[in-house]
Amino acid sequence: MAEVKPEDMVHHPPMDQLQGFEYCIDSNPSWGEAIALGFQHYILSLGTAVMIPTMLVPLMGGNDRDKAKVVQTLLFVTGINTLLQTLFGTRLPTVIGGSYAYIVPVLSIIHDRSLTQIADGHTRFVQTMRAIQGALIVSSSIQIILGYSQLWAICSRFFSPLGMVPVVSLVGLGLFERGFPMIGSCVEIGLPMLILFVALSQYLKHVHVRHVPIMERFSMLVCIALVWVYAHILTASGAYKHTALVTQISCQTDRSNLISSALWISIPYPLQWGPPTFNADHAFGMMAAVMVSLIETTGAFKAAARLASATPPPAYVLSRGIGWQGIGTLLDGLFGTGTGSTVSIENVGLLGSTRIGSRRVIQISAGFMIFFSILGKFGALFASIPFTIFAAIYCVMFGIIAAVGLSFLQFTNMNSMRNLFIVGVSLFLGLSIPEYFSRYMTSSRSGPAHTKAEWFNDYINTIFASPPTVALIIAVLLDNTLDVRDAAKDRGMSWWARFRTYRGDSRNEEFYTLPFNLNRFFPPS
C-alpha cells in the first residue's frame, strides 16, 4: 500500500463561523417558510412550558385550572422575554423559556412549614406562588447588576475556547435524564418518534418540494403530527386504561387535563396571584438558581452563535444579554410563572437540525407563544402532546449542543497533556458530581447539604446539581491557574482575542448591533 504523504491528508482549518447554513442570524427565509419554522419552534418550546408546571403546581396545592393558568403565563412571559432578548439583548436567535435550575429552591419554598400548614389547597397554592414571586423578584437583581454593570463581561474575558468546551458540552449532555429515560417510560410512542425523526431529518433531508428541503426543515412537525395522532388513537382505544399511573401520564394525550381546564381567552397580567411576599431565606436560596441559570445561559449563547453562523458574542454583548435575562426573571416574578428564565437548549439545537439560524424565525415563534397563551383552549390543544414525544426530540437536540461544545476543540492544541487533563477532568466531574447530588436528593429527599440554614442548603444543592456550573468552576479555575504563562496559544485565546471587544472584528457590528439605531445612545465598549 502506497504511503500517504502529509500534503495529501485532508486538513480542516479552524473556522470561527460554522458553515453550511441556508440562512444565518441576519438573513431570512420567505415569510411563509419563516412562519412555519417559527411555529415549529413554538411547538418545541411547549415541552418545558408544560412539564415544569405539571411537576410543581400539584405540590403547591393547585388544581388543574391553576396548572393551566401557570402554563399559559409561562408561555406568555416566554414570548415576551424572547422578543426582548432577540431585539435588545444578545440579538441571537434564542428562545428564553422556563428553567429547571430553579426546581431545588422552588421545592424548598413549597415545603416551607409556614406554607404546608395551610389546609385549603388553592389558598396554599396562591400563597406559595406569591412566595416564589418574591424570591424571583429579589434574586433577579443579581443578573441585572452583573449584566448591565458589565461585570459579567469582565468575568467572561477569562473564558477560553478550551474552558468553554466542557461548559457548552454539558449544557446538552447534562440534560440526559430528559432524553431516553423519559422515552423508556413509554417506549411504544417515544422510540418510533426517535427513529422517525432521525430518518426524516437526516436520511431524507435531500427531499425537495418546490426547491425547499422540506424534510430537513420541517421533519419535526411531520413527526410530531404522525406520532401524536398515533398516541391519540392508543389513548382513545383505551390501551392505557388498566396501566400504571406513570405510564398513563407518559403516554396519554392531555393527561394533564389542560384542554378541559383552560379558559377560552385569558390574558396573563402582573401580580395576577396577588402581591408577592418576601423572605430572606427564600431569596438567598433562589440566588443560587439565578447564578446557575446565568452560567447555563452563557454556554447556550456560545452554542447559539455557532449554530446561527455568527461569530462568538463579544464580552459586551454577552453581558448585555445577561442583563436582559435578569429583566426576564424579574418578569417571571411579577407575572408568577413558578420558575425563572434561561435559554431553551432544545430550540438552540433545532437551529442546527434545520440549518436555519434566522433571528426573524425566533421572533415569529415568540408571537405564536403570546397568541396561543391568550387563546387558552387552542394553546392547550398543542400542549396536550405527550412529553415522551418531546423526549425523543431532545435526544437529538441536546446531542447537537454537546457536539457544538466539542467543536471548540478545533481552536485548541489537543496534543497538549495540559489541555487533555483540563477537558477530561472537568467533563467527568461535571457529570459525576451532579449525579451524586441527584441520587442523594432522590433517595433522601434532601441534598448532601442539610444544615439548619435552609438558604445555605439550597445554595449548595442547586450549584452542584448543575453539570455546566460544576464544569465551568473546574475548567475555568484550572485553565487560568495551570501553566498559564506558556499556554495562551494552546488554550485557543488567540482565536477569540478579537471577539473580546465589540470593535475587535467588523462582523460583530453586522450580527450584534441594536435595532432602531439605538447604538447611538448605548455605545458598545
Image (cartoon, rainbow, N blue to C red):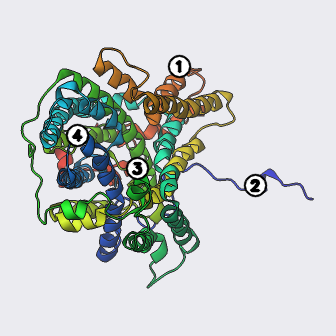
Marks 1 and 2, how far apart in space? 36 Å
Residue 469 image point, x, y percent: 43, 32
Local packing at callout 1 (Cα closer than 10 Å; few below 14, some 14-19, many 20+) is few
Question: Which residue is disc 2 drawn over?
Answer: 9
**Which of the marked residues, 4 or 2, is nearer the chain's N terminus?**
2
Q: Is residue 18 above or below residue 424?
A: below
**Which of the marked residues, 1 or 2, is nearer the chain's N terminus?**
2
Look at the image and tell me whether residue 206 can be seen.
yes
Local packing at callout 3 (Cα closer than 10 Å; few below 14, some 14-19, many 20+) is many
Q: Residue at the spot x=43%, y=74% of the render?
A: 226
Question: Which residue is disc 4 drawn over?
Answer: 60
Q: Secondary structure at mark 2?
A: loop
**Which of the marked residues, 3 or 4, is nearer the chain's N terminus?**
4
**Which of the marked residues, 1 or 3, is nearer the chain's N terminus?**
3
Marks 4 and 1, how far apart in space? 45 Å
**Which of the marked residues, 4 or 1, is nearer the chain's N terminus?**
4
Q: Which mark is residue 188?
A: none
Question: Which residue is disc 3 drawn over?
Answer: 345
| The N terminus sits in image quarter | bottom right
Q: Is residue 208 above or below residue 46?
A: below
Look at the image and tell me whether residue 16 can be seen.
no
Marks 3 and 4, how far apart in space? 27 Å
Q: Nearer the viewer, mark 4 or mark 2?
A: 4
Cβ–Cβ under 8 Å for marks 3 and 4: no
Identify which amino acid the numbered label 2 is placed on. Answer: Met
Question: Which residue is disc 1 drawn over?
Answer: 481
Cβ–Cβ under 8 Å for marks 4 and 1: no
Q: Secondary structure at mark 3?
A: helix
